[in-house]
Image: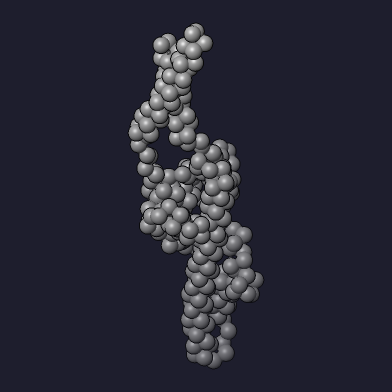
Amino acid sequence: MKVALMALVLGGLSGFWVVKMMLTEWIYESHATLAMRSPSGTPKELEESERSLVFSEAVLGEVVDQLGLMSRWSVARERAMGLLAGKVRVEAMPGAQMIQIWVRDASARDCSMYANALSDAYRRRKVIIETAKSDERLKALREAIAAQEAIVEEKRKAMKALLEESKGSRDADQSDWEASLASEENILNPEGDPESLYSREMQGKSMEAPELSGEGDEGKVIAPLTFPKPDARKDLLMGTGVGVLAGGVMGGVLERWRRRRRD
């Protein structure tokens, strides 16, 4: 009787342990380290800006489409982006203009795949944003150049009218006008080429242009979601029951074997 009882207990414990190990989700982590190329702002502002970009619809949506996560997880696109965001965290490296994109997943292969796809999508989006900012600043500088050219042209016309009225009498007033005109032309383009002003501005050596926001169409920031956890209680109870049943059968067999040996 004692043997059967011990077999029942051991069988139940064994069944519980086996099912619990089968339900245990092993977690893997993978990360990518990337440079933050934002030109201005405090470290905290840069970190928040880059985190918003990583969790943006543009970046997460690209990864969802590229890896086919909608069909893989059998969910809509927006929910797939949320579930992917739930696997991701972004951290700034102290003392460096760098961020790390961390991904957690139960599969080591998928974990690495998500991290690589996210870092690639982030880089591509940064290139698009920086290119748009450069184009906007070039446009603003060209508009500033056109405005300066209009001012110079007005002064040139005024000087020409004055010269026609004075009929060749070049006095001190004419010299003042020429000096003023030369000054305006030097401010407009010190190197004689409108494109050189943009080159000098990009090196921080030319006249100050208006600040531009440079905001792209990254879309809204996606809120992280988590996969629903299965109710393991039924599985654990079933495993324990199967273990007890198996232990009972084994205990009965051992009890019969023990009695036969005694007889």
Is residue 228 visible in the rendered image? The answer is: yes
Q: Position of residue 7 (x, y in %)?
A: 45, 18
Residue found at the far right of this picture: 191
Q: Residue at x 45, y 35 (%)?
A: 23
Seen at 38% across and 48% down, the residue is 223
* Along the viewing direction, whichever of 179 and 183 lies nearer the viewer: 183
Q: Residue at x 51, y 36 (%)?
A: 26
Horizontally, is 47 left or right of 242 in the view? Answer: right
| Rendering coords of residue 157 (x, y %) | 50, 85
Give how far across and how far down residue 115 sits, in percent: 55, 48
Q: In the rendered view, would you say 38 is above or below 90?
A: below
Nearer to me, 120 or 154: 120
User: In this picture, is 181 found above or below 112?
Assistant: below
List the single residue furthest toward the top.
Answer: 262
* Residue 226 location, quadrant: top left
Q: Quadrant of residue 229?
A: top left
Q: Quadrant of the N terminus?
A: top left
The location of residue 5, given as percent across then percent down, is 41, 14
Q: How is the image coloured?
A: one colour
Name the residue located 44 percent from the left edge and 48 percent from the top edge.
Answer: 85
Relative to 155, say whether 1 is above or below. above
The number of callouts visible is: 0
Q: Is residue 240 visible?
A: no
